Amino acid sequence: MAGCTVLITADRRSAELAAALTRRGAQVRHAPALSILSNVDDEQLIADTRELIERAPDVVVVTTGIGFRGWIEAADAHGIADDLMTVLAGSRIVARGPKARGAIQAAGLQADWVAESETSGEIADVLLGEGVAGLRVAVQHHGAGADGLDAVFAKAGADVQSLIVYRWGPAPDPDAVRASARAAATGDIDAVVFTSAPGAEAWLCAAEADGVGPQVVARFTSGAMIAAAVGPITAKPLEHRGITTLQPERGRLGALVRALVSHYEQAETLALCTAVGTLQIRSRVAVLDGQVLPLSPTGVEVLRLLAGGGVVSREAVLAVLPGDSTDPHAAEVAIARLREAAGRGLIKTVVKRGYRLELA
């Protein structure tokens, strides 16, 4: 991923994600669109947990890994974790996706059923199909709420207990979010990483509020910028805007990083086999045989012009240079600088016509 600039829009585990991308050569920007407000010391959460211990549930729905871990940590902080674990062990545990299942297993428990689609809709379909009338159902909410599960189960005759472990809060640095949206709109970002649907929605709304939403969507839909989502739920706000996302086969951060690396290894950016190596041109840099070329933004644009194919005239080179010069010498200087940076074998002069890349 040498030369790629990747924007991370998440707060949680952002350092881990940034480190993994940096190890693979990416430049990382960080602009979390939301914060996570923990309810570990929330009196209501502890009161609800004590009630659950006193009146054990038949079914426990775990919607997020982070929420389940936070719930256990909150119970432990108040000395009731052992009682909670005993109650959970005697209940049927339903997990909304593999991350929730992983947190359940890490706590020494087993999920009895997992919604592999990671949707609350699948959970509702299965439990309502089996029947919940007369059952006590506990739902651990994620940051954006329970997706209507509480109301659906209550309407079907269940005794529902809700547990809110954390909530989504505002962006830690709204100015950074707005700046990141503008950078994405103007071409300074190659890929944007999203790890939650609320975070994706918040970042896109920030871009729209700043007036650059159409430009951001255009760069995504043209393929000039990649929208990488950790899973199908996270991708929904993007897909609602017509944006196709890159997703890993498994909803994990490591798998997401590997999916990005694979994308760029397959040279889905502009890539050419030249006489001096494989050339990739990204948003603001050019990479030749895995090495970022020391080019100015103007140099990258001239190289992008040449990579379009065929012979490029001096007049065409002049058109992408700053200013309004019509002096052919300015085009010759720009080409000379490219040759100095990339090696003289990359660009060939076509007598009386202009320049072209020397392809393999």
Image: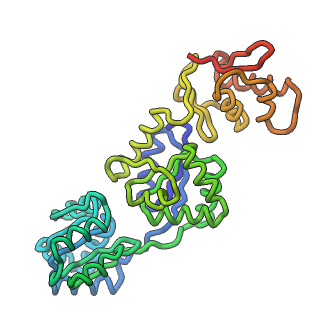
Image quadrant assignment for residue 149: bottom left
Q: What number of labels is visible?
A: 0
Give the vertical position of 296 relative to 88 (above or below): above
Name the spot of residue 248 as percent of width and height, x first. 37, 47
Give the vertical position of 319 relative to 14 (above or below): above
Residue lying farthest to the front in this orientation: 129
Residue lying farthest to the top in this orientation: 351
Quarter occupied by the C terminus: top right
Give the vertical position of 62 relative to 228 (above or below): below
Foreground pick, 48 / 280 = 280
Name the spot of residue 158 as percent of width and height, x first. 20, 83
Residue 82: tell me if it is visible: no
Question: Is 110 on the left or on the right of 301, as rendered?
Answer: left
Name the spot of residue 51 as percent of width and height, x first. 22, 87
Name the spot of residue 261 as percent of width and height, x first. 43, 39
Question: Is 319 on the left or on the right of 252, as rendered?
Answer: right
Give the vertical position of 81 relative to 121 (above or below): below
Foreground pick, 36 / 56 = 56
**Which colour assignment does the render follow?**
rainbow
Question: Is 142 on the left or on the right of 359, as rendered?
Answer: left
The residue drawn where x is 80% and y is 14% is 352
The residue drawn where x is 63% and y is 17% is 358
The residue drawn where x is 18% and y is 63% is 113
The residue drawn where x is 76% and y is 19% is 354
Residue 213: tell me if it is visible: yes
Question: Is 211 on the left or on the right of 141, as rendered?
Answer: right
